[in-house]
Image (spheres, rainbow, N blue to C red):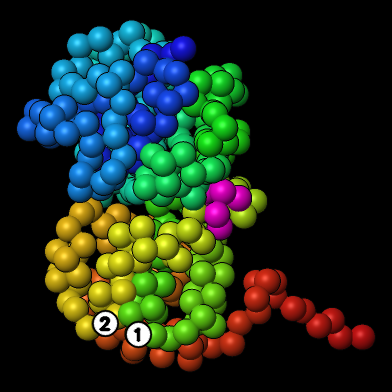
Amino acid sequence: MAKIWILGSGGFGTSLAVNMAANGNKVVLWSLFMEEIETLRADREHKKLLPGVKIPEQVCLTNSLDGVGDADLVIMAVPSFAVRDTARLLQGRLPDGKIIVNIAKGLEKGTLSTLAEVIEEELPKAVVAALSGPSHAEEVARGVPTTVVVASRHRESVSYVQEIMMNPTLRIYENDDVPGVELGGALKNIIALAAGVCDGLRLGDNAKAALMTRGITEIARLGVKLGARTETFAGLSGIGDLIVTCTSMHSRNRRTGILIGEGHSVEEAIALVGMTVEGYISAKSAYVLAQRTGTDMPIIEQTYQVLYEGKSPRQAINDLMTRPKKCENEVVWLTAED
């Protein structure tokens, strides 16, 4: 039995608390907000995000970080915008070499850093791992079979995470490509938002399949320039997470896109979804990264223009469909003269 601290009592943090407790671990679920903890204590249920899923009594609910240093494993489950501040709260509380598993998916606004990089900046003596993949909180909490990947530069740490977190309903694979795993999880949210726009416009299956396929190509293209490996994006944190996020109504990014496609303004769509829409935040970061690195990312560019510059979704689709001719495998064909 391991002692696991989960920082962040949102949907995924709570779902992991339920899942890890069912595996026999001692789990502490933390939130910065006492009101949120008191509600969870009273209901033993996250009624907004995980209705009907009971939080076991053995899960300790707290807004205090006292004792976090004694954890066998610390899981960072706060939204991307709160990762740095939460990491700072841990300064001076953790022994050197403590493993922190980040499960948030996004890029930090402004710095454009991956979230593992943010944690490493604030806690340089910690060992940081990234866990990602097709894993809706609603299904993880209910014990639906789920498979994800955990990445770290330290082989022993990913093996340790596997040992503690893996169970019959949560299968975990190892990887050492931290930027690839993180970028796949962050950038797929943008494509999922765009896929939702396609659904809202009722464009059909062909357009959505093309968007997903070319979307993962763009993600890999940027990822490689930022130090990731191409093959990572063919795995769970790339195409796997992209598929589930682009096709499920659990996805707040897809739901936001559907509303935009149906005619709502971006602001209205985000307000109606009522939660953090990581794809909206990441779209600006990805667009800036593409410009900075000279990476061709037409889907990301058009999505950015729809989200931030008021471009019509139908005009964006037309501009994508009428781009100059390209070769799918991106190899330049050269014909040698005899």
Question: Up-down: is 151 above or below 122?
Answer: below
Q: Which mark is residue 262?
A: 2
Residue at image point 32% right, 62% down: 253
Under mark 2, the amino acid is: Glu
Q: Nearer the viewer, residue 129 or 220?
A: 129
**For residue 238: magenta?**
yes
Q: Are marks 2 and 1 in contact (CB under 8 Å)?
A: yes
Looking at this view, is 167 or 56 the one in front?
56
Image position, residue 112 (x, y; %): 32, 49
Three-letter residue code for mark 1: Leu
Binning the other alpha carbons within 10 Å of mark 1 as few (below 14), some (14 to 19) or many (20 upward) gives some
Reading the image, the residue beneath label 1 is 201
Q: Is residue 185 above or below residue 128?
A: below
Residue 292 in the figure: left or right of residue 226: left
Q: Position of residue 106 (x, y in %)?
A: 35, 48
Q: Main secondary structure of the magenta part?
A: helix
Badge 2 marks a residue whose secondary structure is: loop
| Residue 134 can be seen in this image | yes
Residue 25: name its quadrant. top left
Q: Residue at x 31, y 71 (%)?
A: 257
**Range covered by the magenta-colored residues:** 235-240
The x and y percentages for residue 76 are 33, 31
Tell me: residue 107, above or below residue 309. Answer: above
Give the residue displayed 44% in from the left and 75% down from the top: 298
Of mark 2 and mark 1, the one earlier in the sequence is 1
Instruction: Kindly report the distance in space between the C-alpha atoms of the residues bearing marks 2 and 1.
Output: 6 Å
User: In the image shown, does 274 or 227 lie closer to the viewer?
Assistant: 274
Residue 273 in the figure: left or right of residue 5:
left
Q: Is residue 20 left or right of residue 330?
A: left
Residue 302 visible: no
Query: What percent of the width, then of the height, locates residue 336?
Result: 84, 81
Tell me the SS state at disc 1. Answer: loop
